[in-house]
Amino acid sequence: MTQLIGNAVFWLTLFVVLTVAADVAEFDTLSEWLNSIVGFLPHLLGGGFIILVGYLISAAIRDLVSGALTSVGVSHGELIAAFAQWATFLTAIIVGIDQIGVDVTFRLPSSPSSSARCSAAWPWPSASARGRW
């Protein structure tokens, strides 16, 4: 763990020093590229932190659910606890990846005719028709 933190601090320091050096030497293209990398690091670190904390919380939820269901006598308590852990961890992964900047929007497939079928099924008039009443 110490090696990992040491490597992260080394590369972070290297990027910051290279960015300042490129600014001083007036290498505009290199400077902009390094600024974009250094500007992306907080998002990357924030997303990684969210995923790490989500993993720790999901493990605690697994232990809590497992203990509660075992004490009640539910036969598949471990399976339900594992499902609760993975649901929590998956949520943390989605939030962490979104923090990093990846679009994680979920969209259901729809066809143009499905919206027409749904709107025709409502028993009350549409919003445009209600405005005329």
Image (cartoon, rainbow, N blue to C red):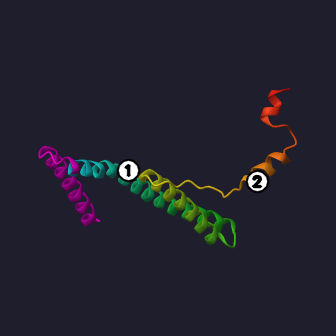
Q: Residue at x 44, y 54 (%)?
A: 50
Q: Position of residue 104 (x, y in %)?
A: 52, 55
* Residue 11 is a magenta residue: yes
The quadrant the C terminus occupies is: top right
Say if 87 sits above or below 127 in the image: below
Q: Residue at x 59, y 65 (%)?
A: 67
Q: Amino acid at mark 2?
A: Ser
Q: Amino acid at mark 1?
A: His
Residue position marked by numbered label 1 in the rendering: 43
Residue position marked by numbered label 2 in the rendering: 113
Task: Check disc 1 and report its element: helix, strand or loop.
Answer: helix
From the viewer's perspective, is the residue at label 1 or at label 2 nearer? 2
Residue 69 appears left or right of 53: right
Q: Position of residue 102 (x, y in %)?
A: 46, 55
Residue 121 appears left or right of 41: right
| Residue range highlighted in magenta | 1-29
Quarter-of-image position of residue 1 = bottom left
